[in-house]
Amino acid sequence: MRDPRPIDRLLDQYGESHLNHTNEVIHMVCVPLIVFSLLGLVWWIHPLAAVLVSIAALAYYFQLSRPFALGMLAMTVVMLALLHAMPPLTVLPLSISIFVLAWIGQFIGHQIEGKKPSFFDDLRFLLIGPLFVLGFLYRRLRLSY
């Protein structure tokens, strides 16, 4: 039997602490908001920094899965376009607010789940969370990753 791909192993490990339906729904909302808020915080420092951070994350995603990387590229472009369209003085306060509220949601989800967030064991899971969410969309659209 063939060993699973690294992306499949990572998603399986991540999924072990995301089995409760309520926690999954919370993640579907909060993970993209956290990604957006993090990009917003970096954008506030400098827009080019946000682009460079995005490129670094996308390079990692391309190593794991080209279909996931393309999905994340589309999501990143939309998020960066939204940040570009926002009045500059709103980026920082909105990003901080979203970041705090979304993380509160995440921890509520994990309280319901009864398991700690995966990234406490491995920081890579901070980058796998968005792929976990994207995987739900891909399965619904019957796309492979």
Image: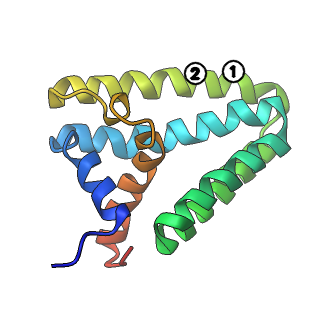
Helix, strand or loop under label 2: helix
Residue located 36% across and 78% down the image = 143
> Would you identify the image quadrant in which residue 11 lies?
bottom left
- Residue under numbered circle 1: 93
**Residue 33: percent from the left, percent from the top?**
51, 39
Helix, strand or loop under label 1: helix
* Relative height, residue 3 to residue 130 (above, below): below
**Residue 82: percent from the left, percent from the top?**
71, 48
**Residue 116: percent from the left, percent from the top?**
25, 27
Q: Is residue 124 left or right of residue 110?
A: right
Visible in this render: residue 98?
yes
Residue located 45% across and 43% down the image = 124
- Residue under numbered circle 2: 97
Contact? badges 1 and 2 (CB < 8 Å): yes
Total number of numbered labels? Answer: 2
Q: From the image, which quarter does the N terminus lie in?
A: bottom left
The colour scheme of the drawn protein is rainbow
> Would you identify the image quadrant in which residue 2 lies?
bottom left
Visible in this render: residue 75?
no
Q: Is residue 36 left or right of residue 30?
A: right
* Relative height, residue 110 to residue 32 (above, below): above
